[in-house]
Every structure is written in structure tokens, then in C-alpha cells.
Image (spheres, grey):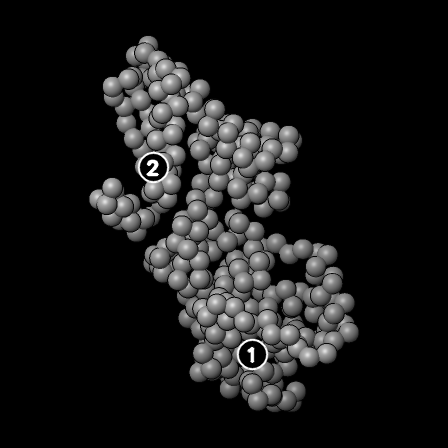
Amino acid sequence: MPETNTKKKKHSALGAGLDALIPPARAGASAASAKKESDAAGRDDDGRVMMAINKVEPDPDQPRKNFDEDELDNLVDSIKQHGIFQPLLVQKKKDFYIIIAGERRWRAAKKAGLKEVPVIICNYTPEEIVEIQLIENIQREDLNPIEEAQGYKKLMEDFDLTQDQIAEKVSKKRTTITNAIRLLKLDPRVQEMLVTEKLSGGHARALLAIEDGDRQYEFAQRVFDERMSVRDVEKAVKKLQKEEQEKPAGGSGKEVSPALAAIYADTEEKLKTRLGTKVKISPKDRTCGKIEIEYYSEEELNHLVDRLQQI
């Protein structure tokens, strides 16, 4: 059966696959250091070598932490029948090699009882390793939303990349990166519900409007128990916000009318859409109050300032 072409996607590093991320001069650049270990097994023209599986270990900083056991078992069956076609990318660390890309194949190979695995020995910077690991998993849709968000945050904090730079590297919109990182502001218990797929990303983003962690978690449990749709959650959260706004503000004893609260809620939504971040209007009475606009990095603050100047 002829091979189907699975790489005819948009021309970007993400769309073209990992090959586009691995400059030939870098992949296999340190292979000479493993020559004594690999010569006995033979080396292919593409730089791959056979390496003892016990000399290869997962990277503890790998973005992906969860592996579906059923999918892993399917890969084990395939490996037992056909072997491993795509070599692992590894890099030397002390007296062993860490996996840059291919941990799932390594796990399946161990379960299948393989003693050796094909590898390509590389020499990347720490930033490049994070990028490759993140992009490989995003490309294969292997990351849950929290793992993906943590990967973006690591690139920002450890390597001083802006959200625009990350968006370009992974071929996503900047707002997608921003919305992903916002999920890390969820209560940890709600994050776990997202990881275990009790909530979808849409549910989780709607719950961000509830700032109190306990209330957010209680509401998330209600969403799961009642099998609420994302639209239902958005409506319920808006209703909750309106009820909060109609309460006396600042102990002044003055209440905001339902009609005015509805106007404030609509204005919040318009500003949220325009600015791409959370906006909260807190009225004290009919004539005064305050507007809160959230940002999650210095780069995002500058972006908001630019947007506000255009309004």
C-alpha cells in the first residue's frame, strides 16, 4: 500500500512536522560522542543508531505528564509487529540520554520488551528542547489544556519569550496562547477536572469569571453533575455576576438596578471581546465605580495599552 502524504499542511514549523524543526546540522551533531556505543549496532545514513533502552530516560521537564494506557497498549501491539519506524530524539546528559521527542514510543518499547531503540543523538539548547517537546505534543494533540498552558508559561518565564513569539513558533494565534495561559489562574481543583476531562476548555474559560476558588470549584462540580453546556455555563455565570453587582457596593447602602447591571454586563463583554482579556466593572452607584482589566505579563500589558489607545 503506498504511503499517504500526511505533511501537506500549511507551511509552518508546526504544520510541516518535526523535520522542519530539526536543522540537519543539529540533529546528530553529537553522535560522534556515542560512536563507541553504537558502532557495533551499525549506523544509518540519516544518523540514527540503535541504543540500549536502559541508557535512555524521559526528560522530567517534558510538558506531557499523562499517557493514555489504551493508546499505549495499541502502540505496544504495533511495535511488536512492525518495530519502531521513527527514531527517538535524544541528547546526552551525564552517563545517559534524555528523550527530547518520543517518550511515548520509549514507554511502549519498554512494555513490548525491546532491549534497544532507534535514536538520533542531538545537541540542542535548553530553549530548543522545550520548543520541540511542546510542538511535538501540540502537533499530535497529546497535551491536555493545562499541560499546554504550562509549556507556554515555561517558554515565557525561563526563556523570556513573548506571547507573540510563542504564537509564531507553534503556529497559533496570539489570543490562543493568552487564553491557554489564563487557565492556570483556575483553582487547582478545577484544573484537575479539566485534566481528567470532566470539564472542557470552554467550560473552564467561562468559570474564570468566578474569582473565589471555593465558589469556582463548587460551580465546576455543578457543571459536571448537571452536564451543563458551555453556553449554559456562560449564562449562569453572567447571572451570578449580575446578582453580585446588584448587591450594595462598598457598604454605601445603594443598589445598582437590574437594568443598569445588565448594561454593565453587556459593556464588560464588549470590552472583553475588544481587548482579549477579562474586564470587570464594579459600580458603586449609578454615577461612579471602577473598571478592572486583567493582564498576565508585561508584554500583554503593553499590548493592552496599544489596544486602548486605538479605542
Residue 260 screen position, x and y as percent: 35, 20
Residue 143 screen position, x and y as percent: 56, 55
Q: Quadrant of the N terminus?
A: bottom right
**Residue 271 bears which disc, if any?**
2
The amino acid on which the numbered mark 1 sits, given as a three-letter code, is Ile
Instruction: Please indicate whether residue 274 sits to the left or right of residue 65 in the image.
Output: left
Question: Where does label 1 land, which residue?
Answer: 120
Residue 140 screen position, x and y as percent: 58, 62
Cα separation between marks 1 and 2: 49 Å
Tag nearer the camera, 1 or 2: 2
Residue 12, picture quadrant: bottom left
The residue at 31%/17% (across/down) is 250
Residue ranking furthest to the top: 253
In the image, 308 versus 85, the foreground residue is 308
The residue at 60%/65% (across/down) is 103
* SS for callout 2: helix
* SS for callout 1: strand
The amino acid on which the numbered mark 2 sits, given as a three-letter code, is Leu
The residue at 74%/70% (across/down) is 78
Q: Is residue 253 above or below residue 66?
A: above
Residue 178 screen position, x and y as percent: 40, 49
Instruction: Please indicate whether residue 258 sits to the left or right of residue 206 in the image.
Output: left
Which badge, 1 or 2, is on the more N-terminal residue? 1
In the image, 1 versus 304, the foreground residue is 1
- The local crowd at label 1, few if under 14, some if 14 to 19, many if 20 or more residues have their Cα within 10 Å, is many
